[in-house]
Each structure stands twice: as C-alpha cells, then as structure tokens.
Image (cartoon, helix red, strand yellow):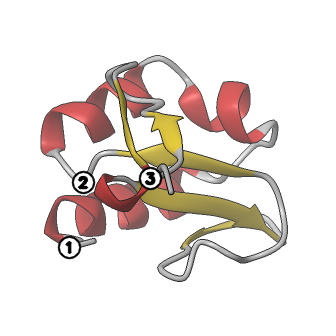
Amino acid sequence: MAEPIRTCVGCGARDRRAELTRLVARAGALEIDAARRATGRGAYLHARAACTKAFARRGGFVRSLRCVIAKVERELLLARLPEVRV
C-alpha cells in the first residue's frame, strides 16, 4: 500500500505524510496535530527551521490555513516546531 504524499507549505517539497508535521487552526489558535486526524483546516510542514521561517515569511497562516492567527500564537508555535519529532 502506498503511503500518502503531502506538500510542505514552507519549502514546497513533496514528501511522505509521516515526514511532515500537521498544523491545524482551531478557535483562533494553532495546534500541532500529532495524530493527523484533528478536525479543521490543516497544513503540512517539515519540522525544520528553514521551512517554518519560509511558511511565516510568505504569510502561510492566512494562505494555507485560511484564517488570521494572532502574532503571539504564531511565534509560540514557530518556536516549538523545529523541536517536533514526527
């Protein structure tokens, strides 16, 4: 059985879903969806500093998640992402 392929919203590279971290926007906050099953609009991102910076720099929160997230929430999540192990 083939593993699902997703696109990183930071670097734009396609990769196996298991290699990416899923983010979900719910109730005006960003959450890391470790189980990859949470409801809500999600986006996949490599857990690398370069990808998280590119995602934030290009306005990925609005473009990919189709919502406005407070700057404080974005900074808290971006600080945690490079440490996430999938």
**Residue under circle 3?**
17
Along the line of sight, the residue nearer the viewer: 76 or 39: 39
Left/right of residue 11 with respect to residue 77 in the rendered view: left
The answer to whether residue 54 is above or below residue 78 is above
Q: Nearer the viewer, mark 3 or mark 2?
A: 3
Residue drawn at x 47%, y 17% as measured from the top left: 58
Query: Marks 1 and 3, how far apart in space?
Result: 13 Å
3 and 2 marks in contact (CB < 8 Å): no
The answer to whether residue 69 is above or below residue 54 is below
Toward which corner of the image does residue 82 lie, by quadrant? bottom left
1 and 2 marks in contact (CB < 8 Å): yes
Query: Marks 3 and 2, how far apart in space?
Result: 12 Å
Left/right of residue 78 with respect to residue 61 in the rendered view: left
**Residue under circle 2?**
47
Q: Nearer the viewer, mark 1 or mark 3?
A: 3
Residue drawn at x 62%, y 38% as measured from the top left: 61
Q: Quadrant of the C terminus?
A: bottom left
Query: SS for tag 3?
Result: helix
**Residue under circle 1?**
85
x, y percent for residue 15: 35, 36
Residue drawn at x 39%, y 56% as measured from the top left: 75
